[in-house]
Structure formats: structure tokens, C-alpha cells
Image (cartoon, grey):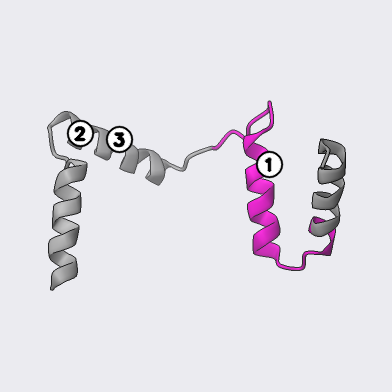
């Protein structure tokens, strides 16, 4: 199947969709492919949380993936 035919089929399927969440997800995926990505503006609260996380990381206050997996497995057994 050629690209043009595939695009037409995708467009037709999207036109028939009634699930707003699914349409939103498709749109978000398409945004990843554009040359003009959407710029996000963070709130003051979001910036504060990011800054706090960065400070914690710099102080060594973080968990490795291995530690997180081990803790998760122990929690799941309870």
C-alpha cells in the first residue's frame, strides 16, 4: 500500500471517530512530527517543583532504577 493510499485510509478512519480522547491522542502524536513543536508554558508551581527536584538530584537525594525496582517488588509482595 502506498503512502498516499495509507494517508487517505487514516484520514477516513479519523473522520469517523467519535471518541474525543482518541482524537486528542492522535493529534498529540501528529504534533510530535511537526517542524513547529508546541511550546509549553509552565506555571510558577510547576517551575518550583522542577527546581526542587533539580536541587534534590544535586544533593544526591534520588533513587536508582535498580533501587526503585527492588522497592516496587517488595511493596508488591505485601
Judged left or right of residue 16, residue 30 is: left
Q: Which residue bears the numbered disc 3?
A: 51
Distance Cα–Cα, label 3 vs label 2: 10 Å
Query: Pointer 1: residues within 10 angstroms few (<14), some, or many (20+)?
Result: few
Q: Earlier in the sequence, mark 2 or mark 1?
A: 1
The span picked out in magenta is 14-40
Q: Earlier in the sequence, mark 1 or mark 3?
A: 1
Give the number of the mark in front: 1 or 3.
Answer: 1
Checking the image for residue 30, the label placed there is 1
Checking the image for residue 57, the label placed there is 2
Give x and y (percent) for residue 76: 19, 68
* Residue nearer the viewer, 2 or 70: 2
In the picture as drawn, the residue positioned furthest to the front comes out as: 1
Q: Residue at x 19, y 50 (%)?
A: 68
Distance Cα–Cα, label 2 vs label 1: 33 Å
In the picture as drawn, the residue positioned furthest to the bottom comes out as: 78
Q: Quadrant of the C terminus?
A: bottom left
Q: Quadrant of the N terminus?
A: top right
Judged left or right of residue 30, residue 62 is: left
Could you tell me which secondary element the residue under label 2 belongs to?
Answer: helix
Distance Cα–Cα, label 1 vs label 3: 30 Å
Q: Earlier in the sequence, mark 3 or mark 2?
A: 3
Q: Residue at x 12, y 63 (%)?
A: 74
Could you tell me which secondary element the residue under label 1 belongs to?
Answer: helix
Figure check: 24 above or below 17: above
Give x and y (percent) for residue 49: 32, 43
Residue 29 painted magenta = yes
Q: Residue at x 62, y 36 (%)?
A: 32
Judged left or right of residue 74, residue 50 is: right
Amino acid at each position: 500500500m502506498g503512502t498516499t493510499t495509507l494517508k487517505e485510509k487514516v484520514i477516513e478512519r479519523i473522520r469517523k471517530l467519535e471518541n474525543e480522547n482518541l482524537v486528542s491522542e492522535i493529534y498529540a502524536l501528529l504534533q510530535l512530527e511537526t517542524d513547529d513543536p508546541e511550546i509549553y508554558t509552565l506555571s510558577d508551581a510547576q517551575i518550583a517543583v522542577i527546581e526542587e527536584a533539580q536541587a534534590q538530584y544535586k544533593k544526591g537525594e534520588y533513587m536508582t532504577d535498580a533501587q526503585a525496582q527492588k522497592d516496587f517488588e517488595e511493596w508488591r509482595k505485601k
